[in-house]
Amino acid sequence: MELLSLRTDESVDQVIEKYKSTVYGIALTRTKNCHDADDIFQEVFLVYYRKNLQFNEEEHRKAWLIKATINCSKKLLSNKRYDTVELTEELAGTVPLQSEEDTYVYTALCELPEKYRMVLYLYYFEGFSIDQISKYLHVRLGTIRMQMTRGRQLIKEKLKGDYFSE
């Protein structure tokens, strides 16, 4: 008798390997805490495994994982008295960043309000298009564009002096 029922399209291990940086990055960006991000990561993939989800398209699977990560982090943040922690370079090192500049930008990004933080993270660090972000987050395209514009301006203000001149 077989205990595990694996999907016919991809195994859970393959899905985890493919989306681990996206799920963990979103969780860390929302919580600013490695331990909570680990919990969210585990919860998302545990739910994915238990529900034995089947998707017709890879885009649908990606959208589900993003939304599940956001929902798990909302649940965690609302269920406990949450103290904001300062994101250090050590924490930023847990998200795959390409350069020292990426670390500065990511640190500044984590200081932004959540609505700007999420769209900028998905766009710049995960490489999603504005159309994809709109679709995955179920938010109007115009709203995403405005959040991107305002978030970029806030990041520019935070990094002024380091990378931007007056």
Image: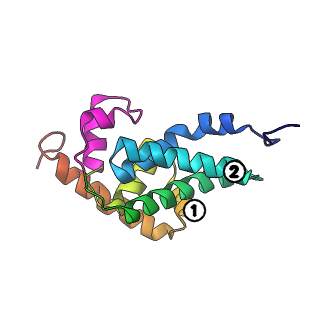
Query: x, y percentage for residue 102?
Result: 32, 36
Residue at 89%, 37% in the rendered image: 1
Left or right of residue 154: residue 21: right
Residue type of the residue flagged with mark 1 = Lys
What segment is highlighted magenta in the picture?
Answer: 85-109
Q: Nearer the viewer, residue 150 or 119?
A: 119
Nearest the viewer among 84 and 150 is 84
> How far from the left and from the top, in percent, is residue 156?
22, 51
Residue 94 on the magenta span = yes
Judged left or right of residue 76, residue 91 is: left
Q: Which residue is mark 1?
A: 135
Amino acid marked by disc 2? Arg
Secondary structure under badge 2?
helix
Give the residue at x 30% y 55%.
Answer: 152
* Placement of 120 over or under 79, stated as above or below: above
Residue at which label 2 appears: 50
Badge 1 density bin: few <14, some 14–19, many ≥20, Cα 10 Å: some
**How many residues crowd around disc 2 within 10 Å: few (fewer than 14), some, or many (20 or more)?**
few
Q: Is residue 37 above or below residue 2?
A: below
- Residue 117 at least partly seen: yes
Q: Is residue 94 left or right of residue 159?
A: right
Of discs 1 and 2, which sits in the foreground?
A: 2
Residue positioned 52% across, 62% down in the render: 137
